[in-house]
Every structure is written in C-alpha cells, then in structure tokens.
C-alpha cells in the first residue's frame, strides 16, 4: 500500500476511535508491522512493511494498534485488548500470519507443490513443510531453501533431519 494512503487511512481510523490527540508516524522497523507508544501517544507503522502489504493488511495492523491505544499500556494482548480489537473489526490474534512478505530476509523457503514462500532472517533449524497447502506436516511438501536467491543448505543438523525423514518414507 502507498504510504500516503496508509497515513490517511490511519488518521481517519484513529479519529473515528477518538484518538484525536494521538500522532501517527512511520518508522523503519522490518520485523514488526506496527507499534503503539502510550508515553508519546503515537501509533507507528513500519514504512518498509507498509510498502509490501496490501490495504487490508495495513488496515488490520492499524486497528491492532488502535486497540492497544484504547485499552491502555497494561493490557498487552489480554482479553480486554481482544475485545477492543474485535469491536474495531481487527483480527484478535496478536501476530500477523507468517506468510506475509518480509523485506530483506535472506532465507526463502519454497513449497514444491504450490510455490508458496516463507522468509526467514536466519537459517531454519528444523525441516518444515508448506503450511499453505497442507495443515499437517507432509514430506512431499518440504520447503526447499535458498539464501539470497542461491540454493543453500541450512546446515548440518537440518540436513541430518531431512535425511532421516527421507529414509523413513
Ligand atoms: Zn499488539
Ligand atoms: Zn504448498
């Protein structure tokens, strides 16, 4: 989503929730999409992630942070926060789905069946299969990993686990 549109959306959603005296800004975070800072009454979105997300995702992030602003700093993601999130129409789970794109994460795992990708900042420690086209572990959907776009091994322990899984089939 374009940043100017995200800023306008955030402002109108914040105002609609009565957060007139809260500020909105972008930050440079790459591992979390948004943050609510009560001390400075600021809701902040990651600029780089906003660039990658679609409008629905950005909207969900903004509403997530608005729910924090409304219930106060002591609640975290407790029942009061979940109630506020639900009443705003935000997903009441604390985390965004892991299938969202993350910029600059060097490791990219690809499902051999459906092509869905998963990005990680560190080499995966365990063998995993695609969570998009299968709900449970499926050896025919084990992700293949590339690092900075080049086929790469995540390491010895990973290879040993992979070999033992293959041997069991
Ligand atoms: Zn949160
Ligand atoms: Zn898949």
Image (cartoon, helix red, strand yellow):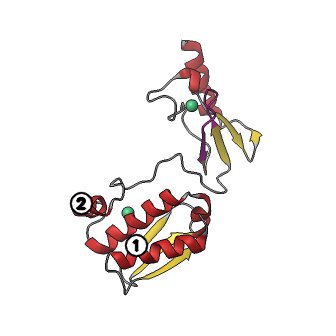
The structure residue drawn at horizontal position 30% and vertical position 64%, both measured from the top left corner, is: 76
| Residue 21 on the magenta segment | no
Q: Is residue 65 visible?
A: yes
Location of residue 46 with respect to 53 vertically, above or below: below
Beta carbon at label 1 within 8 Å of ligand 1:
no
Rendered-image quarter of ligand 1 = bottom left
Location of residue 99 with respect to 78 vertically, above or below: above
Disc 2 versus disc 1: nearer the observer: 1
Disc 2 target residue:
83
Left or right of residue 8, residue 156 in this image: right
Disc 1 target residue:
13
The structure residue drawn at horizontal position 54% and vertical position 50%, both measured from the top left corner, is: 100
Q: Quarter of the image for the C terminus: give it.
A: top right
In this view of the protein, which residue sits in the foreground, 14 or 156?
14
Location of residue 113 with respect to 32 vertically, above or below: above
Q: Position of residue 127 (x, y in %)?
A: 55, 31
Q: Residues within 10 Å of mark 1 (few under 14, many from 20)?
A: some
Beta carbon at label 2 within 8 Å of ligand 1:
no
Q: Provide the residue span drawn in magenta.
A: 110-119
In this view of the protein, which residue sits in the foreground, 104 or 90?
90
The structure residue drawn at horizontal position 32% and vertical position 68%, both measured from the top left corner, is: 67
Alpha carbon separation for disc pair 2 and 1: 17 Å
Q: Position of residue 142 (x, y in %)?
A: 58, 28
| Residue 117 on the magenta segment | yes
Q: Quadrant of residue 117?
A: top right
Left or right of residue 110, residue 98 in this image: left
Left or right of residue 93, residue 8 in this image: right
Report the residue that reaches farthest toward the bottom: 21
The structure residue drawn at horizontal position 60% and vertical position 25%, both measured from the top left corner, is: 162
């Amino acid at each position: 989503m374009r940043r100017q549109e995200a800023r306008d959306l955030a402002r109108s959603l914040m105002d609609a929730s009565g957060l007139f005296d809260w500020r909105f800004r972008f930050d440079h975070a790459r591992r979390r999409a948004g943050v609510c800072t009560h001390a400075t009454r600021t809701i902040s979105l990651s600029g780089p992630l906003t660039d990658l997300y679609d409008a629905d995702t950005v909207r969900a992030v903004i509403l997530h942070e608005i729910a924090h602003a409304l219930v106060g700093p002591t609640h975290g993601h407790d029942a009061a926060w979940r109630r506020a999130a639900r009443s705003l129409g935000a997903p009441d789970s604390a985390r965004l789905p892991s299938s969202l794109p993350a910029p600059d994460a060097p490791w990219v795992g690809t499902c051999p069946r459906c092509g869905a990708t998963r990005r990680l900042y560190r080499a995966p420690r365990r063998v995993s299969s695609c969570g998009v086209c299968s709900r449970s572990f499926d050896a025919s959907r084990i992700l293949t990993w590339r690092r900075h776009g080049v086929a790469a091994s995540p390491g010895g322990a990973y290879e040993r686990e992979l070999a033992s899984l293959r041997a069991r089939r």
